[in-house]
Image: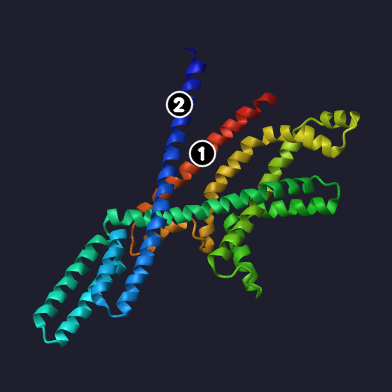
């Protein structure tokens, strides 16, 4: 077996293993997300029913309803509290009836259920931390993917338009787009995020608001403008790298400049720009973490929140490192996809 063939087999095997590992992790995350969402909806409905029963002072039935909540989600601290409160209410009723023995029995049961709840919901234990952290990171990663997708959809076509502007023969248009690219490429993306989100508010017109949706669209606008400027330079280099003779040949054949670009030059340009564009896209996946500077709840924000104290967990470092797995999976799949795309475009050699 030749060395080249052996290397090809090893490369394919590595790609297959990487894809399998990534798909397995995606399946695990998806199943957990769906199951957890279904469990939350059921436990929330059951909890509302139990709370209503408690409010009606039907404490014995409330205890059964809270137990039904725990049958769905054994980590529901509020259900344990509901049972304990119900027992304490029954204890007061028994005490009012001069049945001290029964009152003490209810108090003991309340204490037991409180201890059990504290044990099962102890967030200092890794087994109790994992589902909470996993759920939070999944939600953050969904936000990361949304920001990534919107940025690509906006930045790629806008970058192409900006590249046309920089090649315009009208000096005002040409100068404006070159100045814009100079500003965007010369300043940190973090600064641009801060300016776009907080800038309108300092002028008395907070167009984004303070909710998560506003933060998302502010981040999306900043990312689209930033990456469009970088993409525009890649597009410009790809266009200028195509020999001028192809334009002249197309004009001789009676083609318009638009037909020459879309039917002759565009595919060749794509072949040239795939490697640098793919590099920028992989960088974009990681750069989405900068959106946390405006408190957008992407995956790094979710992981870091457990260091500061979130959902009863504080001073825990491992979630922030665990986020790296999500980035590796996402970039691993993108890398394989771009590699296959490059191979399909090799017929231009």
Chosen colour scheme: rainbow
Return the disc, 2 or 1, that comes first in the chain's sequence: 2
Q: Give the left or right position of residue 288, taking residue 231 as reference.
A: left
The vertical placement of 243 against 155, above or below, is above
- Residue at screen point 70% across, 44% down: 233
Which residue appears farthest toward the top when viewing the image? 1
Numbered disc total: 2
Residue 89 in picture, x, y percent from top left: 22, 80
Residue 151 in picture, x, y percent from top left: 62, 51
Residue 10 in picture, x, y percent from top left: 46, 23
Front in this rendered view, residue 130 or 200: 130
- Residue at screen point 44% across, 58% down: 302
Q: Secondary structure at mark 2?
A: helix
**Separation (CA) of disc 2 from disc 1:** 15 Å
Q: Give the left or right position of residue 141, taking residue 182 as reference.
A: left
Residue 140 in picture, x, y percent from top left: 47, 55
- Residue at screen point 39% across, 55% down: 36
- Residue at screen point 52% across, 53% down: 144
Q: Which residue is mark 1?
A: 333
Q: Give the left or right position of residue 87, taking residue 289 as reference.
A: left
Front in this rendered view, residue 243 or 66: 66
- Is residue 55 at least partly visible in the picture? yes
The vertical placement of 49 against 345, above or below, is below
Q: Secondary structure at mark 1?
A: helix
The vertical placement of 27 against 192, above or below, is above
| Dot label at residue 13 | 2
> Neighbour class for label 2 at 10 Å: few (<14), some, many (≥20)?
few
Q: Quarter holding the C terminus?
A: top right
């Amino acid at each position: 077996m030749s060395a080249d063939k052996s290397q090809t087999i090893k490369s394919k095997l590595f790609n297959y293993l990487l894809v399998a590992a990534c798909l397995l992790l995606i399946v695990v995350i998806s199943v957990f997300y769906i199951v957890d969402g279904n469990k939350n909806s059921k436990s929330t409905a059951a909890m509302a029913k139990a709370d209503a029963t408690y409010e009606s002072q039907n404490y014995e039935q409330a205890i059964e309803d809270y137990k039904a909540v725990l049958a769905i989600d054994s980590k529901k601290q509020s259900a344990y509290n509901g049972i304990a409160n119900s027992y304490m209410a029954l204890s007061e009723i028994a005490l009012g009836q001069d049945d001290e023995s029964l009152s003490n029995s209810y108090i003991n049961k309340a204490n037991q259920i409180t201890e059990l709840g504290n044990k099962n919901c102890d967030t200092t234990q890794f087994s109790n931390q994992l589902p909470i952290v996993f759920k939070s990171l999944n939600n953050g990663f969904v936000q990361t993917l949304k920001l990534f997708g919107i940025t690509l959809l906006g930045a790629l076509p806008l970058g192409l338009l900006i590249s046309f502007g920089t090649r315009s023969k009208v000096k005002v248009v040409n100068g404006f787009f070159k100045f814009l690219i100079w500003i965007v490429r010369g300043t940190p993306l973090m600064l641009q995020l801060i300016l776009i989100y907080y800038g309108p508010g300092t002028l008395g017109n907070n167009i984004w608001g303070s909710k998560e949706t506003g933060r998302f669209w502010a981040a999306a606008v900043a990312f689209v403008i930033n990456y469009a400027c970088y993409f525009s330079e890649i597009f410009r280099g790809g266009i200028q790298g195509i020999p001028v003779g192809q334009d002249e040949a197309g004009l001789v054949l009676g083609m318009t400049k638009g037909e020459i670009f879309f039917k002759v030059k565009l595919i060749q340009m794509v072949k040239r720009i795939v490697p640098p564009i793919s590099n920028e896209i992989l960088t974009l996946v990681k750069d989405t973490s900068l959106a946390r500077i405006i408190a957008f709840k992407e995956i790094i924000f979710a992981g870091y929140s457990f260091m500061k104290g979130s959902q009863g967990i504080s001073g825990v470092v491992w979630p922030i490192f665990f986020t790296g797995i999500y980035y590796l999976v996402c970039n691993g799949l993108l890398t394989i996809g771009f590699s296959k795309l490059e191979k399909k475009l090799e017929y231009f050699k």
